[in-house]
Image: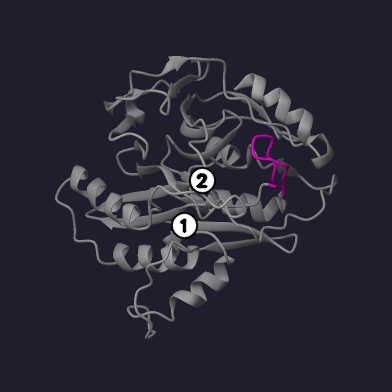
Amino acid sequence: MCTRALWSDANGAVLVGRNMDWVDELATALWVLPRGQQRTDALGGALTWTSRYGSVVASQHDIITADGLNEAGLAGHLLWLAESDYGAHDRERPALGISVWLQYMLDNFATVAEAVGWMQHTDIQVVSMVDPIYGRSVTLHMALEDAVGDSAIIEYIGGKMVIHHSPTYTVVTNSPSYDEQLANVRKYEGFGGTLPLPGSTEAEARFVRAAFYLDRLPQPQSEAEAVAEILSVMRNAAQPFGTPDPERPNISTTVWRTVADLTTKRYIFESCYRPNIVWADLDKLDFVAGAPSRRLDVTGVEWLVGDVSGRFEVRPTLQFLPVFSSDSAESVASGTAERV
């Protein structure tokens, strides 16, 4: 599921766009999560931490952070990757449950280099789970970017962590693995090859189109123009409404998209089910340690539009789904259905 495109030279600003493709709206909500919150690894608490940075995030079913931006200008995104293989859970290694994987990065790091350095130093393991809502194994990779335009894509292939770290890695989609995507794009016109620009909704085609159009954006004269331009790339890589393939949920309708301006610290959300765009300015939000978490429903409101920085409502903080074995998925699904 999804497409991410990083525009690091938008007339002095750094912007990133992301499409979320899935079979339904994912009960998405936006959360304001202040500094100073206590969290655990979703695996029983061997790894605990206190958040150093506040963040605005998009949650799925209020059990996982799928997308977000922190107050230091680090942004991150989880995207589907069917080839993901995290290996057997080694209880001797530091590990994070997949539901809190992205949130750990937003809580603790200001730059991509910091996050990558920590992951390499700790050889952190990600532990996946069976999704209690959709009943399938969760296989994701992560994209990170920061306010200076640095970028990293983190995958687990054959049980090993693989990090692609460079500001040149501007586009991410889904299958195949990132090294194969980089090889594939070189077959096309504009990237050294001879094939014409592809038009399908397959991940490889979306990767090529996003890279092609991102590379040709004119310099914007304002932030509003920059947001409009990156949205044009994301919409070109989007998938229209239609009947989803239950066996391939990554080849499904684009249900929402985000744009993060990492320079001005503005987080923009667009639901594809509603003709509007909303945004939150991080400098208008209260990230002070001890401030309450706040939540904004962005899928249950028909005409929410514009600056919603003041519309978030106080809620108990986001609770990340603990990792369960597949044989307990049915009971987890029952309990989660009651919560959501």
Q: Quadrant of residue 275?
A: top left
Q: CA distance from mark 1 to mark 2?
A: 24 Å
Q: Is residue 168 visible?
A: no
Does residue 54 lie above or below 75 as drawn?
above
Residue appearing at x 39%, y 84% in the figure: 193
Residue 238: percent from left, percent from top: 38, 53
Membership of 37 in magenta stretch: no
Mark 1 sits on what residue? Answer: 151
Q: Considering depth in this image, is 71 or 327 the residue closer to the camera?
A: 327
Q: How is the image coloured?
A: one colour
Q: How far across and down, in percent of the image, does residue 117 sit?
A: 60, 54
Name, please, the residue furthest toward the front.
Answer: 243
Bounds of the magenta segment: 126-137
| Residue 78 falls left or right of residue 240 | right
In the picture, measured across the screen, residue 329 lies left or right of residue 20, that is right
Tell me the element at label 2: loop
Tell me the SS state at disc 1. Answer: strand
Quarter-of-image position of residue 264: top left
- Amino acid type, mark 1: Ser
Label 2 CA crowd tier, 10 Å (few <14, some 14–19, many 20+):
many
- Residue 316 in sight from this viewpoint: yes
Q: Is residue 71 above or below residue 337?
A: below
Q: Please rate how many residues cluster around mark 1, counting C-alpha atoms within 10 Å: few if below 14, some from 14 to 19, many from 20.
A: many
Q: Nearer the viewer, mark 1 or mark 2?
A: 2
Position of residue 272 measured from the top left corner of the image (x, y, whole percent): 36, 40
Which residue bears the numbered disc 2? 22
Residue 325 left/right relative to 101: right
Where in the figure is residue 182, as x and y percent of width and height? 49, 72
Mark 2: amino acid: Trp
The residue sitting at 77% across, 36% down in the picture is: 329
Name the residue at 43% across, 54% down.
4
